[in-house]
């Protein structure tokens, strides 16, 4: 068993080693901070790579010179000034940016504009006008399928695509008979629209609006 004197010596040795280690670390840190960065500094004036992109938007040929990193959403909003397509989460989780591309709905925030050279794109502005609403737009108005309206353009674009999917016989996760035409019941519509979030909670009215356009009886 160690004597009190031996314990005291060991304690002093441990403390001295700890102080020495901390001192070495501090010196190394200061030395590292003084080392200049390797290579020349990046130029803040360097031009971003751009390319020409051409597609058909709402029936019209449009050409844009874009930074190759530009999302389709930003190309529509900033490049073509089509503000109906909304930027919500910008992570593909809310559906506010939904547009119809070559007949299928997509989240425009998750894809680059340069990937869609020659594509046909329909935004909410291309579905109808205030004087001549698209049937889905009119149904949303009739059934109060919105409150704040921020998600409504994406909801309507998605709803139009949903009916096209059902008409084409494309099943969803809740379709029981994969060999038959999917039904127009609430479960089917809710599942297909689940990627479009309405923070105001107008879901039941949205389902009613889609059902009416599909010809479903109340």
Image (spheres, rainbow, N blue to C red):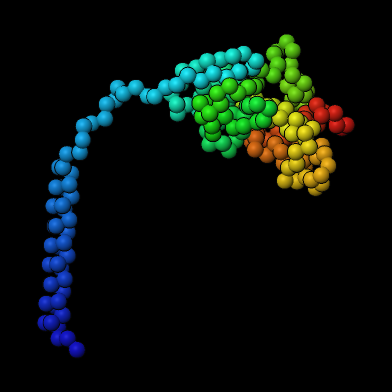
Q: Is residue 111 above or below residue 64?
A: below
Q: Is residue 46 left or right of residue 131?
A: left
Occupied quadrant, residue 14: bottom left
Question: Where residue 148 sits: x, y (%)?
Answer: 64, 26
Residue sitting at x 15%, y 52%: 28
- In this rendered view, identify the residue nearer to me: 9 or 132: 132
Q: Residue furthest right?
A: 217
Residue 44: image location, x then y, percent: 29, 25
Picture quadrant of residue 131: top right
Q: Residue furthest top?
A: 131
Left/right of residue 120 with respect to residue 76 in the rendered view: right
The single residue placed furthest to the bottom in the displayed view is: 1
Q: Residue at x 16, y 74 (%)?
A: 11
Residue 205 visible in this rendered orientation of the protein = no
**Quadrant of the rendering where the N terminus is positioned:** bottom left
The image position of residue 63, as x and y in percent, is 52, 15
In the picture, the quarter occupied by the C terminus is top right
Q: Nearer the viewer, residue 130 or 201?
A: 130
Percent of width and height locating residue 92: 56, 36
- Residue plotted at (14% across, 67% down): 17
The residue furthest front is: 118
Left or right position of 88 against 104: left
Q: Nearer the viewer, residue 101 or 163?
A: 101
């Amino acid at each position: 068993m160690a004597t009190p004197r031996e314990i005291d010596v060991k304690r002093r040795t441990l403390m001295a080693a700890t102080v020495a280690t901390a001192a070495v670390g501090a010196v190394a840190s200061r030395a590292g901070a003084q080392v200049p960065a390797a290579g020349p500094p990046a130029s803040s004036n360097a031009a971003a790579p751009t390319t020409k992109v051409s597609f058909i938007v709402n029936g019209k040929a449009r050409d844009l010179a874009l930074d190759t990193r530009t999302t389709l959403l930003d190309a529509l909003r900033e490049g073509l000034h089509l503000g109906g397509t909304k930027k919500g989460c910008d992570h593909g989780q809310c559906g506010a940016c939904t547009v119809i591309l070559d007949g299928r709905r997509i989240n425009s925030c998750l894809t680059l504009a340069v990937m869609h050279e020659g594509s046909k794109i329909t935004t909410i502005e291309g579905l109808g006008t205030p004087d001549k609403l698209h049937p889905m737009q009119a149904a949303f108005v009739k059934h109060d399928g919105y409150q704040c309206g921020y998600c409504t353009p994406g909801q309507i674009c998605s709803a139009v695509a949903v009916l096209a999917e059902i008409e084409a016989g494309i099943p969803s996760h809740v379709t029981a008979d994969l060999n038959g035409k999917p039904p127009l019941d609430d479960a089917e519509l809710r599942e297909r629209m689940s990627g479009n979030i309405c923070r105001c909670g107008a879901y039941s009215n949205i389902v009613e609006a889609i059902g009416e356009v599909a010809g479903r009886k109340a």
